[in-house]
Amino acid sequence: MEFHSTKAIALGVLIVITLILIRYLYSRIKKDELLKGLEPRIIRKELNRLYKMDSSYEINTSIALQKLLRTIIRLTYNPFLTVKESKKLLKHCCKAIYQNTLMNQELEKLSENIEKIGELERVYSTIYSSSTSRWGDDTFPTTTFDIDEYYLSMDYMEMLGDAIDKIPSPLLPSYHEERKKSQ
Amino acid sequence: MEFHSTKAIALGVLIVITLILIRYLYSRIKKGKLLKGLEPRIIRNELDRLYKIIHCYGYSQEKYAIECRKIETSIALFELLLTIIRLTYNPFLTVKESKKLLKHCCKAIYQNTLMNQRLERLSKDLIKLKELSCDFTRESLKFDLITEESRKSGLKFFKVDYDDIHNVEYLRMRLSSTISDLETSTYRHVKKESLKRLKKMRREVRKKWREAEKHGQIEWEKRARDAGKNTEKWREAEKHREIEWGKRVRDEEKKAEKRRANNTSKEQLN
């Protein structure tokens, strides 16, 4: 069977395009499975939630990571990106987001602890200052304490010291080394 | 001119392959420029350094909570960057797409680095706090004996020289200021205002954009240039003000010197 040359060339091109289309459909099915639970709507919601928050450094990192995930999801539908490659990209991105979330949780715990310490310190300071009064003159200044209130403030001071000790540390390896040396 | 059909089909396929090859070469050149400074060797070195840190400090046995998470996030991000760089050479990934991917990944790494730097500062503050708390407890324990004695003798008050309590007071103030600093640096909350501010900002940007579109890009550029000129003018004015201020200060100093000289001469005369 013989064809007209241009028709034959067009057929060749058509074969390639059909192959590409089949590949696209195949990857689309496979990638749909990959992207389950990663709907752009959910990510947009998460991004909106983050935008609403105060712009601190941990939120900036989370926003950047969510934006990256959105771009990766959009790219996943590229038919020439193999399923393996897309899987790798998504896996690494989700891992980074997961680690970042864990880090944010740790930070939240830390800020809660510091908040508690702040409250304790404020209580301690008020009791301590109410227990003291200045006497004498400029040449011989003395400080007088109410014993009961001073004891109460000491209790709070101990609680404060305990709370400070309980902060999850060491945070820095150098600090860990120093502590080991001192021990 | 007529071909044998199979030969013609092969030619069609060859044309498509050649087109793909041309596209590959074009994107390779463009992407080569994009990837300058992002050599996989550098990223692998950085990854090795991070793996070593985790290995050295045996994070699994001890509770290096934040430090450990910090390093693991960095590792995950660098691995992602390495994958993206490898993928960039895919000829079917357009230059625009690759640029977007790399931009977002690099931004995430940058934000993470900023976060790590701030965390390092935070941990230094925490170490300072622990040290301060130890010093403070040690110093305040010095008064235990006095308080015990006063209590035994049934007194309601006890007196201490201010010089003795001075050190404790100083430490207490430093402790409270360190705690309040830490509170401000770690505290985060949802702000309703920030959402409003964000919406307002977006509206303003859209408004500006529409205006720019109406008047054309030239008008917009003119405005930007004018704004630049205004800032320059402002800077010059500030410079002049500084000079003027310096003059005034010098004049005042001269006057004060004169006054002092007059006073001393008067005193000498007296």
Image (cartoon, rainbow, N blue to C red):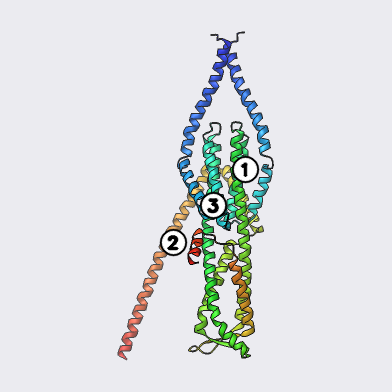
Q: Could you say which is closer to the camera, residue B38 or residue B208?
A: B38
Q: Is residue B153 above or below residue A15?
A: below
Task: Return the x and y of residue A33 as percentages of the image width and height.
Answer: 68, 37
Is circle 3 on the same chain as circle 1?
A: no
How far apart marks 3 and 1 lie (CA) works out to 24 Å
Q: Residue at x 54, y 60 (%)?
A: A171
- Mark 1 element type: helix
In terms of image quadrants, where is residue B36?
Answer: top left
Amino acid type, residue under disc 2 in the picture: Glu
Tag 1 subunit: A
Query: What x and y, as percent, mark residue A46?
Result: 66, 49
Residue shown at 58% from the left, 52% from the top? A60
Which residue is disc 2 drawn over? B238
Q: Residues within 10 Å of mark 2 (few under 14, many from 20)?
A: few
Q: Callout 1: 10 Å neighbours few (<14), some, many (20+)?
A: many
| Crowd rating for badge 3 (residues with CA inside 10 Å; few <14, some 14–19, many 20+) | some
Query: Which numbered mark, 3 or 1, is in the foreground of this view?
Result: 3
Residue named by callout 1: A70
